[in-house]
Image: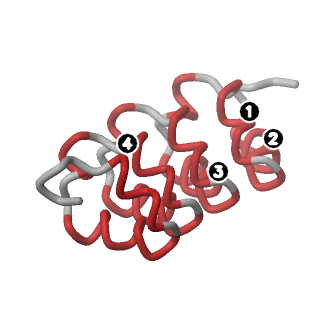
Amino acid sequence: MDWNNKELVFDAVQQDGCALQWASDELKNDKEVVFAAVQQNGCALMYASVALQNDKEVVLAAVQQDGFALQYASEALRTNEEVVFAAAQNNGFALDDAPGDIA
């Protein structure tokens, strides 16, 4: 498979979000592709670019799908109350990945 082909990678991550790990760096930084991946599997956020791990919209989608995705968010978003609340709503144990002053 051509992991640099946006259409193919987009289809793959819709089936299994963690397929993002094999995508090219360019596609790991493509908001549309990463958003589709985290909607299918929130923990696919671990394979996203640093920039998208710091994108509030992407991170919110990830933690709403799987609260444990909070651990892959940027430090700034792991302390964002809206993001932490969304993660906790999905899974209360996700608070283990929030800094002490938030959790």
Give whichever of 43, 6 is nearer the camera. Answer: 43
Which circle, 2 or 4, is nearer the viewer? 4
Q: Read off the residue under disc 1.
A: 5
Q: Nearer the viewer, residue 62 or 33?
A: 62
Mark before the other along the chain sequence, 3 or 4 = 3
- Identify the element where label 1 is drawn: loop
Which residue occupies 51% across, 67% down?
91
Mark 2 residue crowding within 10 angstroms, few (<14) / some (14–19) / many (20+): few
Q: Position of residue 24 (x, y in %)?
A: 62, 23
Cα–Cα gap, marks 2 and 4: 22 Å
How many numbered marks appear?
Answer: 4
* Mark pair 1, 3: CA separation: 15 Å
In the rendered image, residue 102, in percent from the top left (x then y), is placed at 17, 59
Q: Which residue is mark 3?
A: 37
Amino acid type of disc 1? Asn
Q: Secondary structure at mark 2?
A: helix
Assign the N terminus to one quadrant of the image. top right
Image side of residue 96 versus residue 6, left or right = left
Residue contact between numbered discs 1 and 2, judged by CB atoms under 8 Å: yes
- Residue tagged 2: 8
Tag 3 and tag 4, C-beta contact below 8 Å:
no
Q: Give yes or no for contact between labels 1 and 4 (Cβ–Cβ under 8 Å).
A: no
Which residue in the structure is indicated by mark 4?
Answer: 53
* Image quarter (top left, top right, bottom left or bottom right) of the C terminus: bottom left
Kind of residue at disc 2: Leu
Q: Nearer the viewer, residue 14 or 46?
A: 46
| Earlier-in-chain disc, 1 versus 3 | 1
**Residue at the farthest bottom position:** 89
